[in-house]
Amino acid sequence: MQLTIKHITHYAYDTALDYSIQRLLLTPHSFASQSVKSWQVSAPGMAQAMQYRDAFGNKVHLITSNPGSGAYDIVAEGVVEVRDVAGVVQGLSVPVPDAVFLRQTAATLPSEPMEALLQGFGSAARAALPFLHELMAATHGAIAYETGTTHAHTTGAEAFAQGRGVCQDHAHVFIGLARKAGVPARYVTGYLVADDVSPAAHAWAEALVPDLGWVGFDAANLKCPTDHYVRVACGLDAAGTAPVRGCRRGGTGEHMSVEVRVEMSQQ
């Protein structure tokens, strides 16, 4: 399937912005089941941006700018062709050792109630594919999808305790429990278009399955990623994979809004 994507991050300030430096994780990779046909990122300072791949293999743009105004946009857009391979990720280079993805962060660290859920699975086959599917289902059942109930800094344990959250929270809980079970797991950002939900930026998890490799698990939607998903970046948790992250001088009263459009296009 071929998907056309436009992701706009709009910043507005009450006073003029003097200077900003931002790290952008907005560029998808081509690998076995995903082919980037065209892609561009537009932003103040983009012409002089530093480009590199980080330790997780993500394509990074580091931009500095002096907008001299109170508003600007960062726009990522392009066309990506994706094949449905039941979530299996092949042909993608991630330089860090797989064991790095056993490291818990504040966002993924399981609480005692989360660990109690994990204990119900036993320990015989925790690295096997059936276990990860069961863990995905358990995570989906433990957290009802409800927007506005959590925020960017909510931990997986907090979302689990209240039983409500969004895709970020489902991913953090799944990752934390997979790591607790000894399975390397990583946080993934990208895009999703589906028949029954609005097209949007999205987050899910990938876990390492012996003799198969990395496989995606979207606990929010109770499925492995299909050709309706575009993978952009991965890391240890949501904070490390934020599409736009940085700091500024000047520009009081920041207002940020995001618009994402994902459409199925003619091939």
Image (tube, rainbow, N blue to C red):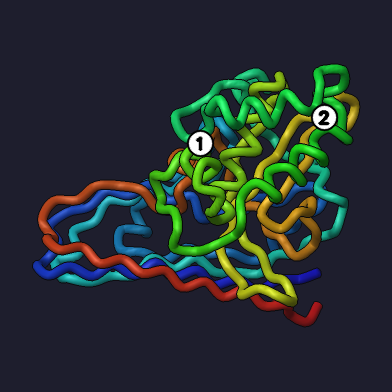
Residue 230 lies left or right of residue 45; in this view the side is right
Q: Which residue is mark 1?
A: 157
Please, what secondary structure does the residue beneath circle 2 have?
strand
Image coords of residue 82 (percent x, y): 78, 61
* Residue neighbourhood size for the residue with mark 1, other residues' Cα within 10 Å, grouped as few (<14), some (14–19), many (≥20): many
* Residue shown at 82% from the left, 41% from the top: 133
The residue that disc 2 covers is 209
Residue 3 visible in the picture: yes
Q: Is residue 78 above or below residue 133?
A: below
What residue lies at 84% left-to-right and 59% top-to-bottom?
A: 83
User: What is the x, y in percent for residue 254?
Assistant: 21, 63
Q: Position of residue 39 (x, y in %)?
A: 58, 64
Relative to 53, say whether 230 is above or below. Answer: below
Labels 1 and 2 touching (C-beta < 8 A): no
Near-viewer residue (103 or 170): 170
Nearest the camera: 72 or 139? 139
In the image as oriented, which residue stretches furthest toward the bottom? 266
Q: Is residue 223 left or right of residue 64?
A: right
Q: Position of residue 161 (x, y in %)?
A: 51, 41
Q: Quadrant of the C terminus?
A: bottom right
State whether residue 180 is above or below residue 89: above
Please state the total of marks drawn on the protein image: 2
Residue 52 appears in view:
no
